[in-house]
Every structure is written in C-alpha cells, then in structure tokens.
Image (cartoon, helix red, strand yellow):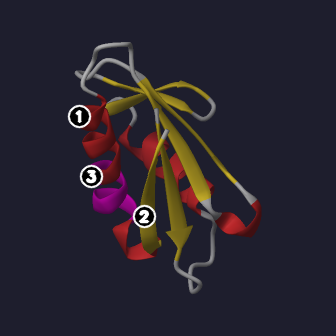
Amino acid sequence: MKIIQVVPKPTIDSNLKTLLKNKERELRGRPTAFHREREGKWKHVKHPGWITWDTTRGGLLVAEVHTKKGCSDWQLLQAFVGYLDRHLGENIESVTVYYR
C-alpha cells in the first residue's frame, strides 16, 4: 500500500476534499479515469484496485492506494497523482508518497 499526502496552497478558499468532490461530480457521466464507488472511495476504470481518501486537520488530503496482491500498484498511483495534477494542480503545494 502507498499513502499519498497532498498539501494545499495556503491561498485557496476551499479545502481539497471539496474541490476533489466537485470535480468528480462535474466529470461524472463523461469518460474519465476514476469513478466513485462511495464517499471517499474511487476505482480506476482500467487498473485493478481502489483509492480511499479523506482530509485531515490543517486541510491535508490523505489517500491510500490499495491494489490486489501481485498487481502493479504503480499504475494506479500514477493515474491518481496525474488526476490530481490535471484537475487540482493550481491548488496543490506539494505531494508526498509514503511506501508501506
């Protein structure tokens, strides 16, 4: 499992969780890489596994990348970081990946 910590820029008005949920709602129904499984849990359309995410105190977004045993979790990690960069990049200060 890999854990992603996303630090928002101090200048944004909203928190990253709200921005991420709004973007998912905006893209829902169109071709997109991720689909919502439930609140805070997304699945990728092509790569096996899922992402769970939520915010913490201070507005940090923390996501866990879960894959089935023997699968290439780097693909799911790359897809999620790419999604964050494309859709929320201007609101992100930094992204850190922890290997567990």
In space, the residues marked 1 and 2 are separated at their CA atoms by 17 Å
In space, the residues marked 2 and 3 are separated at their CA atoms by 11 Å
The residue pinned by badge 3 equals: 82
Q: Amino acid at mark 2?
A: Val
Q: Is residue 35 above or below residue 18?
A: above
Q: Is residue 75 above or below residue 86?
A: above
Residue 84 magenta-highlighted: yes
Residue shown at the point (49%, 38%) measured from the top left: 100
Residue at the limit of the structure toward the top, as seen here: 69
- The magenta-colored residue range is 82-88
Q: Determine which quarter of the picture holds residue 40.
A: top right
Residue 63 magenta-highlighted: no
Q: Amino acid at mark 3?
A: Gly
Q: Is residue 61 above or below residue 33?
A: below
In space, the residues marked 3 and 1 are separated at their CA atoms by 10 Å
Q: Position of residue 95 (x, y in %)?
A: 42, 64
- Mark seen at residue 39: none
Q: Position of residue 77 (x, y in %)?
A: 32, 41
Q: Main secondary structure of the magenta part?
A: helix
The residue pinned by badge 2 equals: 95
**Local SS, label 2:** strand
Q: Is residue 92 left or right of residue 44?
A: right
Residue shown at the point (38%, 75%) measured from the top left: 90
Q: Earlier in the sequence, mark 3 or mark 1?
A: 1
Residue at the limit of the structure toward the bottom, as seen here: 11
The residue pinned by badge 1 equals: 75
Q: Is residue 79 left or right of residue 42?
A: left
**Local SS, label 3:** helix
